[in-house]
Image (spheres, helix red, strand yellow):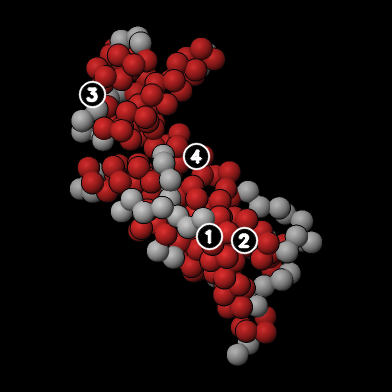
Amino acid sequence: MRPSTIEKQKKIIEIATVLFLEQGYRDTSLDQIVQHCGGSKQTLYRYFSSKEGLFKAVLAHNLESLEGVFSFPEHPDHPVDACLVHFGLGYVKRLCSNPVLGLFRIVSADFHQDADITDFFLANGPENQHHHLASYLKSEAVTQQLTIPSANQACTHLLAMLKQNFFYLALLGKSLPDDEQLTLQIRQAVDAFIRIYHPTHIGR
Protein backbone atom coordinates (compact mmCIF):
# COMPACT_ATOMS: atom_id res chain seq x y z
CA MET A 1 0.00 0.00 0.00
CA ARG A 2 1.37 3.43 -0.97
CA PRO A 3 2.39 5.81 1.84
CA SER A 4 -0.08 8.40 0.54
CA THR A 5 -2.91 5.87 0.82
CA ILE A 6 -1.89 4.98 4.37
CA GLU A 7 -1.86 8.67 5.31
CA LYS A 8 -5.31 9.18 3.78
CA GLN A 9 -6.72 6.22 5.70
CA LYS A 10 -5.14 7.46 8.92
CA LYS A 11 -6.67 10.91 8.42
CA ILE A 12 -10.11 9.40 7.81
CA ILE A 13 -9.80 7.21 10.91
CA GLU A 14 -8.73 10.14 13.08
CA ILE A 15 -11.60 12.34 11.88
CA ALA A 16 -14.09 9.48 12.23
CA THR A 17 -12.85 8.90 15.79
CA VAL A 18 -13.58 12.50 16.74
CA LEU A 19 -17.04 12.45 15.17
CA PHE A 20 -18.01 9.08 16.66
CA LEU A 21 -16.95 10.27 20.12
CA GLU A 22 -18.75 13.60 19.79
CA GLN A 23 -21.98 12.41 18.15
CA GLY A 24 -22.14 8.67 18.70
CA TYR A 25 -22.07 5.95 16.07
CA ARG A 26 -25.69 6.14 14.96
CA ASP A 27 -25.73 9.93 14.57
CA THR A 28 -22.53 10.08 12.55
CA SER A 29 -22.92 9.58 8.81
CA LEU A 30 -20.35 8.82 6.16
CA ASP A 31 -21.39 12.06 4.45
CA GLN A 32 -20.33 14.00 7.55
CA ILE A 33 -17.00 12.23 7.62
CA VAL A 34 -16.41 12.98 3.92
CA GLN A 35 -17.35 16.62 4.55
CA HIS A 36 -14.66 16.90 7.23
CA CYS A 37 -11.86 14.97 5.52
CA GLY A 38 -12.54 15.63 1.84
CA GLY A 39 -12.59 13.05 -0.92
CA SER A 40 -15.70 11.06 -1.69
CA LYS A 41 -17.91 8.45 -0.14
CA GLN A 42 -16.67 6.02 -2.79
CA THR A 43 -13.17 6.41 -1.35
CA LEU A 44 -14.45 5.46 2.11
CA TYR A 45 -16.16 2.39 0.72
CA ARG A 46 -13.02 1.41 -1.18
CA TYR A 47 -10.89 1.68 1.96
CA PHE A 48 -13.31 0.34 4.59
CA SER A 49 -16.19 -1.38 2.72
CA SER A 50 -18.88 0.09 5.00
CA LYS A 51 -19.55 2.38 7.95
CA GLU A 52 -19.16 -0.63 10.23
CA GLY A 53 -15.86 -1.46 8.57
CA LEU A 54 -14.69 2.09 9.25
CA PHE A 55 -15.74 1.76 12.88
CA LYS A 56 -13.70 -1.44 13.16
CA ALA A 57 -10.70 0.45 11.79
CA VAL A 58 -11.31 3.17 14.39
CA LEU A 59 -11.41 0.54 17.14
CA ALA A 60 -8.24 -1.18 15.94
CA HIS A 61 -6.34 2.10 15.61
CA ASN A 62 -7.27 3.43 19.03
CA LEU A 63 -7.03 0.15 20.94
CA GLU A 64 -3.57 -0.39 19.48
CA SER A 65 -2.48 2.70 21.41
CA LEU A 66 -3.01 0.72 24.63
CA GLU A 67 -0.14 -1.60 23.72
CA GLY A 68 2.39 1.07 24.67
CA VAL A 69 1.17 0.83 28.26
CA PHE A 70 2.07 -2.88 28.26
CA SER A 71 5.77 -2.29 27.62
CA PHE A 72 7.74 -3.80 30.49
CA PRO A 73 11.51 -3.93 31.10
CA GLU A 74 12.87 -7.42 30.63
CA HIS A 75 15.92 -7.07 32.88
CA PRO A 76 15.35 -9.04 36.12
CA ASP A 77 16.96 -6.30 38.23
CA HIS A 78 13.96 -4.01 37.78
CA PRO A 79 11.73 -4.22 40.90
CA VAL A 80 8.41 -5.75 39.95
CA ASP A 81 6.41 -3.50 42.24
CA ALA A 82 7.80 -0.32 40.65
CA CYS A 83 7.11 -1.68 37.15
CA LEU A 84 3.54 -2.60 38.05
CA VAL A 85 2.82 0.78 39.66
CA HIS A 86 4.09 2.52 36.51
CA PHE A 87 2.00 0.18 34.38
CA GLY A 88 -1.08 0.59 36.60
CA LEU A 89 -1.04 4.38 36.37
CA GLY A 90 -0.75 4.32 32.59
CA TYR A 91 -3.38 1.60 32.24
CA VAL A 92 -6.00 3.26 34.43
CA LYS A 93 -5.47 6.71 32.90
CA ARG A 94 -5.71 5.36 29.34
CA LEU A 95 -8.70 3.13 30.12
CA CYS A 96 -10.63 5.91 31.85
CA SER A 97 -10.24 8.59 29.18
CA ASN A 98 -11.07 9.09 25.53
CA PRO A 99 -10.76 7.65 23.02
CA VAL A 100 -10.86 4.23 24.74
CA LEU A 101 -13.58 5.15 27.24
CA GLY A 102 -15.85 6.71 24.63
CA LEU A 103 -15.43 3.81 22.22
CA PHE A 104 -16.32 1.38 25.01
CA ARG A 105 -19.53 3.36 25.58
CA ILE A 106 -20.38 3.16 21.87
CA VAL A 107 -19.73 -0.59 21.65
CA SER A 108 -21.79 -1.34 24.76
CA ALA A 109 -24.67 0.95 23.74
CA ASP A 110 -24.91 0.39 19.98
CA PHE A 111 -23.36 -3.04 19.41
CA HIS A 112 -24.23 -5.11 22.48
CA GLN A 113 -26.26 -7.43 20.24
CA ASP A 114 -23.70 -7.49 17.43
CA ALA A 115 -21.29 -10.36 18.12
CA ASP A 116 -19.03 -9.37 15.24
CA ILE A 117 -18.21 -5.94 16.70
CA THR A 118 -18.11 -7.02 20.35
CA ASP A 119 -15.83 -9.97 19.54
CA PHE A 120 -13.61 -7.66 17.50
CA PHE A 121 -13.46 -5.19 20.40
CA LEU A 122 -12.57 -7.92 22.88
CA ALA A 123 -9.92 -9.45 20.62
CA ASN A 124 -8.24 -6.11 19.94
CA GLY A 125 -8.72 -4.69 23.42
CA PRO A 126 -9.12 -6.59 26.68
CA GLU A 127 -8.09 -10.06 25.47
CA ASN A 128 -5.03 -8.71 23.71
CA GLN A 129 -4.11 -6.70 26.80
CA HIS A 130 -4.32 -9.80 28.97
CA HIS A 131 -1.89 -11.55 26.63
CA HIS A 132 0.74 -8.81 26.98
CA LEU A 133 0.44 -8.62 30.76
CA ALA A 134 0.42 -12.40 31.18
CA SER A 135 3.62 -12.60 29.13
CA TYR A 136 5.30 -10.17 31.50
CA LEU A 137 4.09 -12.09 34.56
CA LYS A 138 5.72 -15.23 33.08
CA SER A 139 9.02 -13.46 32.44
CA GLU A 140 12.23 -14.11 34.34
CA ALA A 141 12.08 -10.59 35.75
CA VAL A 142 8.89 -11.52 37.62
CA THR A 143 9.46 -15.20 38.39
CA GLN A 144 12.68 -14.33 40.22
CA GLN A 145 10.66 -12.22 42.64
CA LEU A 146 7.18 -13.76 42.73
CA THR A 147 5.63 -17.22 42.62
CA ILE A 148 2.77 -17.18 40.10
CA PRO A 149 1.17 -20.60 39.42
CA SER A 150 -1.10 -19.20 36.67
CA ALA A 151 -0.09 -16.04 34.84
CA ASN A 152 -3.53 -15.73 33.23
CA GLN A 153 -5.29 -15.89 36.57
CA ALA A 154 -2.81 -13.47 38.13
CA CYS A 155 -3.37 -11.12 35.20
CA THR A 156 -7.12 -11.12 35.86
CA HIS A 157 -6.50 -10.48 39.56
CA LEU A 158 -4.13 -7.58 38.92
CA LEU A 159 -6.30 -5.78 36.38
CA ALA A 160 -9.33 -6.03 38.65
CA MET A 161 -7.33 -4.70 41.60
CA LEU A 162 -5.96 -1.81 39.53
CA LYS A 163 -9.28 -0.79 37.98
CA GLN A 164 -11.07 -0.83 41.35
CA ASN A 165 -14.17 1.29 40.63
CA PHE A 166 -12.31 3.89 38.55
CA PHE A 167 -13.59 2.57 35.22
CA TYR A 168 -17.24 2.40 36.24
CA LEU A 169 -17.13 5.90 37.70
CA ALA A 170 -15.48 7.15 34.50
CA LEU A 171 -18.27 5.61 32.45
CA LEU A 172 -20.67 7.73 34.52
CA GLY A 173 -18.68 10.87 33.79
CA LYS A 174 -16.73 11.02 37.05
CA SER A 175 -13.12 12.18 37.03
CA LEU A 176 -10.14 10.20 38.27
CA PRO A 177 -8.56 11.29 41.56
CA ASP A 178 -5.63 13.69 41.33
CA ASP A 179 -2.25 12.16 40.48
CA GLU A 180 -1.10 11.96 44.07
CA GLN A 181 -4.21 10.14 45.27
CA LEU A 182 -4.36 7.91 42.20
CA THR A 183 -0.71 6.90 42.62
CA LEU A 184 -1.37 6.05 46.27
CA GLN A 185 -4.34 3.85 45.41
CA ILE A 186 -2.51 2.13 42.56
CA ARG A 187 0.47 1.50 44.83
CA GLN A 188 -1.81 -0.02 47.48
CA ALA A 189 -3.35 -2.33 44.85
CA VAL A 190 0.09 -3.42 43.64
CA ASP A 191 1.28 -4.01 47.21
CA ALA A 192 -1.73 -6.25 47.81
CA PHE A 193 -1.01 -8.15 44.58
CA ILE A 194 2.67 -8.60 45.56
CA ARG A 195 1.66 -9.96 48.97
CA ILE A 196 -0.64 -12.53 47.36
CA TYR A 197 2.05 -13.85 45.01
CA HIS A 198 5.13 -13.43 47.17
CA PRO A 199 6.81 -16.83 47.90
CA THR A 200 6.34 -16.42 51.66
CA HIS A 201 2.59 -16.00 51.15
CA ILE A 202 2.09 -18.81 48.59
CA GLY A 203 3.16 -21.49 51.03
CA ARG A 204 0.61 -20.52 53.67
Find out whether the residues at labels 1 and 2 contact each other: C-beta distance under 8 Å.
no
**Residue placed furthest toward the bottom:** 204
**Residue placed furthest toward the right:** 77
Q: Nearer the viewer, mark 1 or mark 3?
A: 1
Residue 84, numbered label: 2
Label 4, label 2: how many angstroms apart (C-alpha)? 20 Å
Q: Which residue is mark 3?
A: 29
Q: Residue 108 appears at what percent x and percent y?
A: 27, 48
Would you say residue 140 is visible in this rendering? Answer: no
Q: Which residue is mark 4?
A: 64
Q: Residue 18 appears at what percent x and percent y?
A: 37, 29
Three-letter residue code for mark 1: Leu
Task: Name the residue: 34% across, 16% down.
Answer: 36
Q: Which residue is mark 1?
A: 182
Q: Is residue 69 left or right of residue 19?
A: right
Label 2, label 3: how many angstroms apart (C-alpha)? 41 Å
Label 1, label 3: how many angstroms apart (C-alpha)? 38 Å
Task: Name the residue: 71% across, 71% down.
Answer: 145
User: 109 above or below 191?
Assistant: above
